[in-house]
């Protein structure tokens, strides 16, 4: 019996000892992709609870042995759950994933990742919706340092710090637009209503997007869908007084909580002839339509998306820009009232442009714990451009220019983020085929060609301290043109026969067939820093060494560019552009009244072998008289400054000001650069009252000073006056006078889902001409324009 009692006591002692055995459990909670510590994470083990400190650490000192469910919760992350067995002291590392709405997009935006030393300005969704009937070039003109190069009012492309065309890259949802962008009158084929925000990256430092973007990058990004079950959409209707036009746009999206989403949208726009204050602008109407579709499945760890975009445009070119002889050309450029005015019409006759553009894109990404986020994107673009001249007889309905451009692009990108640094590395590859249809019966402005391009880049960012960041990047690009081109025999022998005999193929009467094959290599790099000495000052500096390959038009243009109303002459001997660019941004905040923000952005660009297109004469052809513009290579420099001021005077009243100045100089010829943006400034007062159904009212004055720095490229032509031949000088150089425009914008929510807005541009119907509009030689700009819009959201 004593033995039994002894055994029972020993067994109970062991059981009691086991029941009271406890262990320490500690660990860290960190972000999945960059391994940064996550503060204020609640960690629960059974009934026990702890919260992480600023280093992401948590600890439990006495957890009884046993099996538990561990749960970690953070307000910005998905919950983490794991079964743990506590049989000894434990050290745990927990990684949490962000919610789907926090998935970063490819672009840089105020609510996304830090943009480092890049100079970025953003137009958000509200600004886009209020100006939904505008084209991209005109819309971006609301940003300091950005203007528009125009051919009339319907054709507009962005200029950043005096640079445009191939020097400004435009990305549609991660796809770099390939659309014969070399043409000054080739507007971007996009519908601004497709996008949630549009970012402008000033300068050449965004090497990820290509070394040719020496002026900057326009990044257009669609909405990132929330992770919930819902249907949402909107319907917009706009009426436009100048042109008696109307625009309609609609979109609807079905979104699921599991990450699936489907969206479909589109728009149409119709304009008739626009009018200047004193006369009708004959043949300036347009038809525009677009369609877009996306289906995607995204979680934090992985995602895949298919996107499709289509735009169609039929754009009239002002009839007065195409004239038949020297006398008419001289009169057209000197008369205050054009010969061609006519009565208002919705008809779009020749000259005109017809453009069809398709984009199909497949993209996918996956996050890996050790190598970061790996993304892959393939896209196909088809651009069909037809330009119609004023032709007679059987060729009346045949385009004078008919180009089909097919582009394949592929990008593979890896983004590795850690607490102190990030490293982004990628490769680009593309193939482009251009076909110029000989059925036009006209000299081919652009030849048939294949373009092969590849690039590799790497961008490193390091956080030295909480207020000091540095970054550096490098990129290498290879480009090859394989071209089939006919030259006039006299032109070939005069310009190229001695320098490029290997390109000769055969002679056919007075024409020479050639097969140029040109290779280009470019190395670019940048370095930048961001310094925040305190919460009220943010300093950014960026240096970039850039190289740009000549585009196909600069190399091979040869003939009449019908919709531009000019003859363009390229130069196959052009070399790579090489430049050095410096950007400084100072953002300051002052505690004055309700808050004053001031941003100053001085910049400098020094370039060698800068490709410049300038007027070199006037030529009389069987289709009329046209200025001749030729490409030449020079050394140049550009510098300037952008200023932005936002001064909140009261809770409802805000002053918004901006100004820009750019200085461009042709150092080779010691003359100013052509087509530099005139000095300009804008002053606006904004009144908002949320309690009045989100009412807002803005009055703005935008002033452009006369551009007094310009080169002189006038032409002399013979005309007949009273039966005698007289030489007359055609002024193709002198900029028009400065001007000042008043604009107003107002809007209100009529109900929870319905809003209305009104815009009045050129309120006082001022007659003026824009130096950056190629139609300025022939007509005034459009006059007063009332734009009324309604939007229903669901």
Image (tube, grey):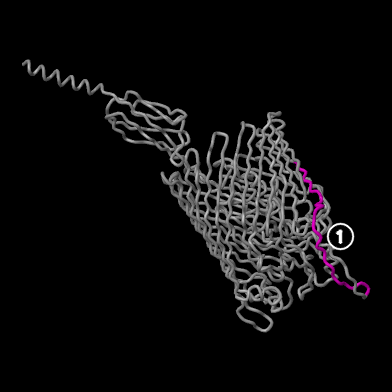
Instruction: Note whether residue 217 is visible.
Output: no
Q: Is residue 704 magenta?
A: yes
Q: Is residue 368 magenta?
A: no
Image position of 10 (left or right of 73) = left
Q: Is residue 695 above or below residue 719?
A: above
Residue 354 at x, y percent in the picture: 66, 65
| Rendered-image quadrant of the N terminus | top left
Give the camera-side residue of 659 and 770: 659
Mark 1 lies on residue: 336
Residue 543 at x, y percent in the picture: 62, 47
Secondary structure under tag 1 reads loop
Taking the view exactly as shown, the residue that stands out farthest to the top is 2
Residue 8 at x, y percent in the picture: 12, 19
Could you tell me which residue is drawn at 78 percent across and 63 percent down?
282
| Rendered-image quadrant of the C terminus | top right
Magenta segment = 699-722
Residue 688 at x, y percent in the picture: 69, 36
Write down the quadrant of residue 781 in the picture: bottom right
Give the camera-side residue of 71 and 395: 71
Write down the quadrant of residue 578 in the picture: bottom right
Q: Residues within 10 Å of mark 1 (few under 14, many from 20)?
A: few
Could you tell me which residue is drawn at 54 percent across and 50 percent down?
252
């Amino acid at each position: 019996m004593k033995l039994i009692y002894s055994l029972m006591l020993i067994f109970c002692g062991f059981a009691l000892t086991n029941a009271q055995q406890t262990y320490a459990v500690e660990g860290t909670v960190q972000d999945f992709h960059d391994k940064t510590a996550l503060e204020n994470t609640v960690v629960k083990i059974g009934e026990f609870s702890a919260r992480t400190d600023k280093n992401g650490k948590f600890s439990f000192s006495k957890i009884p042995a046993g099996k538990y469910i561990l749960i970690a919760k953070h307000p910005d992350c998905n919950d983490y759950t794991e079964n743990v067995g506590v049989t000894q002291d434990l050290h745990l590392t927990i990684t949490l994933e962000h919610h789907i709405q926090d998935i970063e997009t490819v672009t840089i935006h105020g609510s996304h990742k830090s943009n480092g030393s890049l100079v970025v300005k953003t137009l958000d969704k509200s600004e886009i919706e209020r100006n939904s009937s505008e084209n991209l070039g005109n819309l971006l003109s609301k940003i300091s340092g950005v203007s528009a190069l125009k051919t009339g009012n319907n054709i507009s492309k962005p200029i950043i710090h005096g640079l445009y065309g191939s020097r400004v890259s435009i990305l549609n949802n991660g796809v770099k637009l390939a659309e014969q962008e070399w043409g000054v009158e080739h507007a971007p084929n996009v519908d601004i209503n497709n996008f949630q925000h549009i970012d402008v990256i000033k300068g050449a430092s965004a090497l990820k997007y290509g070394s040719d973007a020496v002026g900057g990058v326009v990044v257009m990004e669609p909405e990132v869908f929330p992770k919930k079950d819902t249907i949402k959409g909107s319907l917009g209707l706009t009426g436009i007084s100048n042109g008696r036009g109307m625009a309609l746009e609609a979109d609807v999206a079905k979104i699921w909580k599991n990450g699936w989403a489907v969206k479909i949208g589109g728009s149409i726009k119709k304009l008739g002839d626009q009018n200047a204050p004193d006369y009708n602008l004959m043949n300036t109407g347009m038809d525009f339509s677009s369609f877009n579709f996306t289906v995607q499945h995204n979680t934090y760890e992985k995602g895949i998306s298919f996107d499709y975009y289509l735009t169609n445009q039929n754009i009239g070119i002002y009839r007065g820009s195409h004239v038949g002889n020297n006398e008419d050309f001289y009169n057209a450029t000197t008369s205050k009232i054009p010969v061609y005015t006519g009565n208002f019409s919705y008809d779009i006759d020749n000259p005109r442009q017809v453009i069809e553009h398709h984009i199909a894109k497949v993209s996918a990404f996956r996050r890996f714990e050790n190598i970061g986020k790996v993304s892959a994107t393939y896209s196909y673009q088809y651009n069909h451009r037809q330009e119609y001249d004023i032709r007679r007889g059987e060729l009346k309905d045949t385009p004078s220019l008919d180009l089909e451009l097919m582009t394949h692009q592929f990008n593979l990108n890896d983004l590795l983020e850690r607490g102190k640094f990030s490293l982004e590395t990628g490769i680009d590859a593309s193939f482009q085929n251009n076909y110029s249809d000989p059925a036009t019966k006209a000299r081919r402005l652009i030849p048939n060609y294949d373009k092969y391009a590849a690039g590799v880049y790497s961008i490193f960012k390091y956080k030295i301290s909480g207020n000091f960041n540095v970054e550096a990047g490098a990129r290498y690009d290879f480009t090859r043109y394989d071209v089939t081109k006919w030259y006039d025999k006299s032109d070939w022998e005069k310009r190229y026969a001695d320098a490029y005999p290997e390109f000769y193929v055969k002679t056919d009467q007075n024409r020479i067939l050639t097969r140029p094959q040109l290779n280009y290599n470019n190395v670019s790099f940048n370095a930048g820093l961001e310094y925040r000495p305190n919460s009220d000052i943010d300093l950014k500096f960026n240096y970039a060494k850039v190289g740009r390959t000549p585009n196909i038009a600069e190399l091979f243009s040869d003939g009449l560019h019908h919709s531009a109303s000019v003859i363009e002459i390229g130069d196959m001997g052009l070399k790579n552009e090489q430049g050095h660019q410096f950007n400084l941004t100072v953002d300051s905040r002052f505690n004055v009244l309700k808050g004053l923000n001031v941003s100053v952005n001085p910049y400098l660009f020094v370039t060698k072998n800068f490709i410049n297109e300038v007027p070199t004469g006037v030529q009389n052809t069987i289709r009329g008289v046209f200025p001749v513009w030729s490409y030449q290579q020079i050394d140049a420099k550009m510098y300037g400054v952008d200023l932005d001021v936002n001064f909140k005077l009261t809770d409802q009243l805000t002053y918004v000001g901006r100004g820009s100045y750019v200085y461009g100089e042709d150092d080779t010829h010691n003359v100013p650069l052509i087509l530099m943006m005139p000095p300009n400034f804008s002053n606006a007062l904004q009144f908002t009252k949320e309690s009045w159904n989100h009412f807002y009212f803005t009055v703005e004055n935008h002033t452009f000073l006369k551009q007094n720095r310009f080169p002189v490229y006038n032409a002399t032509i013979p005309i007949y006056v009273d039966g005698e031949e007289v030489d007359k000088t055609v002024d193709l150089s002198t900029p028009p006078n400065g001007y000042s425009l008043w604009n107003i914008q107002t809007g209100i929510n009529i109900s929870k889902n319905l809003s209305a807005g009104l815009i009045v541009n050129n309120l006082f119907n001022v007659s003026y001409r824009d130096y950056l509009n190629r139609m300025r030689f022939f007509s005034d700009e459009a006059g007063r324009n009332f734009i009324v819009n309604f939007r229903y959201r669901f």
